[in-house]
Image (cartoon, rainbow, N blue to C red):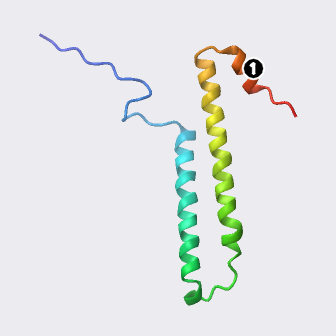
Amino acid sequence: MARRRKKRKKRDSPGQRSSFSDRLYWLNFKMAWIFVFLCFVLTVFSGKLGVMDMAIVNVGVPAAFTELGLHTGFIIWKHKTENCRKHKNVNLLQELEVIEL
């Protein structure tokens, strides 16, 4: 007797590749934390390296997390909009897409 193959789930299967924006988000997340770690290393070894100007720590670390926060907000908005379109919730979709200044 032949066994039937189980159908794989579309989104939840571990072998499926994630979308480009999701991969870009994780790259952004990793690079922000690597940058912060390197700033800490620079701070620790600044005396031995002779680095006098530590402006990169004052400006770079908040800038990295600001960019990461903006990217996170975009990803959340994008997924919320995609879910509204997928489930045909037109009322909520119109509220999400209309931006009043």
**Which residue does the numbered mark 1 point to in the structure image?**
94
The amino acid marked with disc number 1 is: Gln
Q: Is residue 16 above or below residue 4?
A: below
Instruction: For the C terminus, give its image quadrant.
Output: top right
Instruction: For the N terminus, give its image quadrant.
Output: top left
Q: Residue at x 61, y 89 (%)?
A: 50
Rendered location of residue 41, percent (x, y): 53, 75
**Numbered disc total:** 1
Q: Residue at x 37, y 35 (%)?
A: 14
Q: Residue at x 62, y 14 (%)?
A: 88
17 to the left or right of 55: left
99 to the left or right of 13: right
Rendered location of residue 97, percent (x, y): 75, 26
Q: Is residue 41 above or below residue 49?
A: above
Mark 1 element type: helix
Rendered location of residue 23, percent (x, y): 52, 44
12 to the left or right of 63: left
Q: Is residue 45 above or below residue 22?
A: below
Q: Residue furthest left?
A: 1
| Neighbours of disc 1 within 10 Å: few (<14), some (14-19), many (20+) | few
Rendered location of residue 64, percent (x, y): 65, 59
Q: Is residue 8 above or below residue 72?
A: above
